[in-house]
Image (cartoon, rainbow, N blue to C red):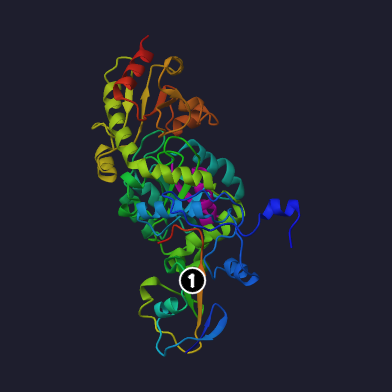
Amino acid sequence: MSSGFATRALHGTGPASEETFSPLRTPIHDTVAFGFDSAQSIADAFAGRIPRHSYSRISNPTVAEFEKRVQQLADSLGVVALSSGMAAIANLIMTLAGAGTNIVASRFLFGNTTSLLTHTLEPWGLETRFVDMTRPEQVAAAIDHNTRAVFLESITNPQLEVADLAAIAAISHAKGVPLILDNTAPTFYLCRGQDFGVDIEVVSSTKYISGGGTSVGGLIIDHGLFDWTKSPRLASRAAKFGPFALLATLRREANRNLGACLSPHAAYLQTLGLETMPLRIDRSCASTLALAEFLRNLPQVQSVNYPGLTDHPAHALAERQFGGRYGGILTFDLASQEDCFTFIDRLHLIRRATNINDNKSLALHPASTIFNEFTQAEQEILGIRPTMIRLSVGLEEIGDLQNDLEQALIS
Amino acid sequence: MKLAINGVTQEVPGDLLTVMQVLNSQKVESPDMVAVQVNGVFVARPQYDDFVLKENDAVEFLYFMGGGCA
């Protein structure tokens, strides 16, 4: 029996072809829902008795392939991909903590992370205790029986502070609290968090992974080291899922209920980006070190901050934790905010944009942009100076970058 | 032996079956992405080869779909 025009427009002449063409890249499965053969099979999928994708807010084959590739590269237990790095942090903290509990976090964090903790989550009853992570005794003093996680960045953005991960992990674990590391700056390529006792990593895949600022995304990487029976929020799931308790809760609760899923298009781009990530990181790290040394010899530059410089206070620690490469971000100070604005306006090659680890080099004045919601007094506490410029070093020829910096600094 | 697998009682050939043998006999897809419970208690993956099931045990295979799990 032939169908009507509108029905044929919707369904074609039969089921969608499942012919395999052996593509070298995972196709973009750009669909919201997935079909089932029977009522029983969809019931089994919802109950978790069979492995099937049902709805792309919860899981999708293209996103799953990206997660699998990251899981293998990070040598982790499992990975959940989300729509942004901030979504990864928010989903993770909302899964582990709640009203009446607290998080112990670095005083130096990405501005939006600080804002998430203080402006967004504090009104819901979550306390954040900010500490100096370079003084691990402050972490020990801040943790109590209501602490649900310790949170820090591997290289803080943009203060470029580096803390002793193993020391902080030892303190966290002695108190029965998981350690979360925002590992965006070096990624799991330069810094294997689990080697230092990190339980969970969050990574903004928008940065190095996306392969040139193509797409926004975030990752939660569970190394499977933490005993989730110790987590009040996850203890009951730990009895059911064992070490997979966090991953199962993220998938079945946070992803489903908060809806910050990564799109299949973004997952495709970021899987592609993973292929060249180590090459791009190697080049940008080498260029950043060269530019740090170049800038410190220019008379207009008051100071240069980069963990790769041997006089950086955490240089030896950074060398140990990141294997002799120090990331693609440096900061430097000029005499005044006015000088910073003039310098940024004069740049020809380096772009004026708020992103990091793009293939293109980018310059930003943090105080007036990513930290503009904080008062100057708050900015001082957060390590942000009005005279500071953040430079994210891309893949251009080093000579071209030096020329652009030099011509923009000529007064 | 008689086992309740994902809520359905069935006869599985063999007398002394391990969790891994039942996983294999049931042709469980993606065995590296499934959590196993026996009588409501989680069984860790390293125990699959040694955990011997008893008659009438309830075995649950629970997937948390999406990939990215070792």
Picture residue at 45% right of the left edge, 44% below the top? A270
Q: In the depicted view, which residue is nearer to us: B65 or A184?
A: B65
What is the x, y in percent for residue A359?
A: 40, 32
Say if the magenta span includes residue A285: no
- In the rendered image, the vertical position of residue A367 relative to residue A281, given as above or below: above
Under tag 1, what secondary structure? helix
What is the x, y in percent for residue A54?
A: 59, 60
Q: In the depicted view, which residue is nearer to us: A6 or A26?
A: A6
Q: Could you tell me which quadrant the C terminus of chain A lies in?
A: top left
> Mark 1 is on which residue type?
Ala
Q: Which residues are magenta?
A: A84-106
Q: Quadrant of residue A154?
A: top left
- In the rendered image, the vertical position of residue B49 relative to residue A149, given as above or below: below
Furthest residue in direction top, as rendered: A411
Furthest residue in direction front, as rendered: A1
Crowding around mark 1 (Cα neighbors within 10 Å: few <14, some 14 to 19, many 20+) is some
Say if the magenta span includes residue A90: yes
Q: Is residue A293 left or right of residue B42?
A: left
Q: In the depicted view, which residue is nearer to us: B36 or A341?
A: B36
* Whether residue A329 is visible: yes
Furthest residue in direction right, as rendered: A4
- In the rendered image, the vertical position of residue A81 relative to residue A161, given as above or below: below
Chain at tag 1: A
Residue identifier under label 1: A239
- In the rendered image, the vertical position of residue A211 relative to residue B8, given as above or below: above
* Whether residue A99 is visible: no
What is the x, y in percent for residue A307?
A: 30, 35
Q: Is residue A9 left or right of residue A394?
A: right
Q: Could you tell me which quadrant the N terminus of chain A lies in?
A: bottom right
Q: In the depicted view, which residue is nearer to us: A205 or A234?
A: A205
Q: Quadrant of residue A334?
A: top left
